[in-house]
Image (cartoon, rainbow, N blue to C red):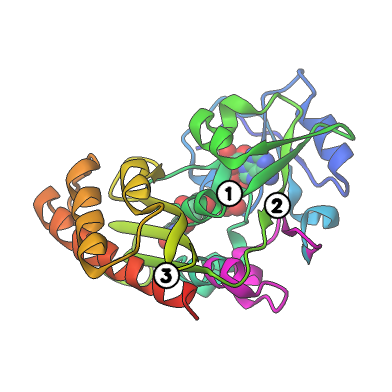
Amino acid sequence: MLKKLTRFYYPKTIEEACLHLGNSDHKTAILAGGTSETLRQDNTIEALVDISKVKELNYISKDSVYFRIGAGTPVQDIYKSKTLTGPTGDLLKAAAGKIGSTLLRNSITAGGNLAALFPWSDLPVVYMVLNAEVVCRKGKPKRTVPVQTIIDKKASQFLSAAEIIAEIAIPIYGKGTGTSFAKLVKTANDYSMITIATRVTVKAGRVEQARLAVNAITASPMRCLEAEKMLEGQKATPELIAETAKKVASSVSIRKDFRASREYRQEVLEVMFRRALEEALEKAGK
Ligand SMILES: Cc1cc2nc3c(=O)[nH]c(=O)nc-3n(C[C@H](O)[C@H](O)[C@H](O)COP(=O)(O)OP(=O)(O)OC[C@H]3O[C@@H](n4cnc5c(N)ncnc54)[C@H](O)[C@@H]3O)c2cc1C
């Protein structure tokens, strides 16, 4: 476990962090909350760049279009945030509050949870259904990409050597939009067996936009595209909601592990998905 580690840097700015990361003399990695990086069996890493002291990565703010979350922000701050409100804020806080224990939430960061993409990672599905954008910085230069790009390519493949995830910008949704988050776990601290995030926007009694995603049941976060299409443009009747949930449960490729069989997860997924959709639609109607 990190047997070759000889250097530990505590940069104070993003530019300083990127300088260390770009130093090709040593194999270098970022340490954010450290909850997975320190457990990695990578004995080639020689230097760690701890970004926890970079203040410009730790904030939650709001402008007219986006909530902006610095990549180094602990997920506990998201859970407790007073800035995050409305359907967007509700979903972010619901997911953040269900991540592990308070101790873990104080360490796990908004950016680390996206960069280290595990089946049990809770925020990536939320970022996906909210159409989040990710701001990446390489020193001063920055580029903004849809979160789906980072999820599809994985941060470790997508980012260049001296580049970091600096911010997650999440559109602010208003009236007519409802969101929901659901997770099946054996205990509050256990890894998820099923994770669901939904966002629906309803206009004149019909679903204008549906964004539905799952994780844990699958190997990585996944949009439920067929189910989204079934809902969009339609009146969300109880029959359609039930059919949509059935579609999700029958179309995703379900993982199994020692926690639960594929069959059990499939049955529970259908029920949980129906309830999650009902919840989001009910909130959209308020
Ligand atoms: C017991 C336990 C239970 C857990 N339960 C849950 C759970 O229920 N739900 C959940 O979502 N998560 C859970 N996690 C956390 C999850 O497994 C990851 O460990 C966590 O999301 C990583 O975030 P971090 O901030 O700690 O990142 P680190 O461990 O510091 O880094 C992880 C990886 O991301 C890279 N990285 C970090 N920040 C950036 C950045 N800004 N830019 C580019 N790359 C970056 C690092 O280089 C590293 O490769 C749990 C962890 C533990 C140990």
Residue at 17% from the left image edge and 56% from the top image edge: 265
Residue at 56% from the left image edge and 55% from the top image edge: 130
Magenta-highlighted residues: 62-91
Counting from the top left corner in percent of width and height, residue 45 is at 61, 29
Counting from the top left corner in percent of width and height, residue 90 is at 55, 73
Residue for badge 1: 131
Residue 120 belongs to the span the image colors magenta: no
**Direction from residue 231 to residue 36 in the image, left or right:** right
- CA gap between label 1 and label 3 equals 16 Å
Residue for badge 2: 169
Above-or-below relation of 286 to 184: below
- Looking at the rendered structure, the secondary structure element under dot 1 is loop
Above-or-below relation of 191 to 28: below
Residue at 42% from the left image edge and 62% from the top image edge: 206
Q: Amino acid at mark 1?
A: Asn
Query: How many other residues sit within 10 Å of disc 3, few (<14), some (14-19) or many (≥20)?
Result: many
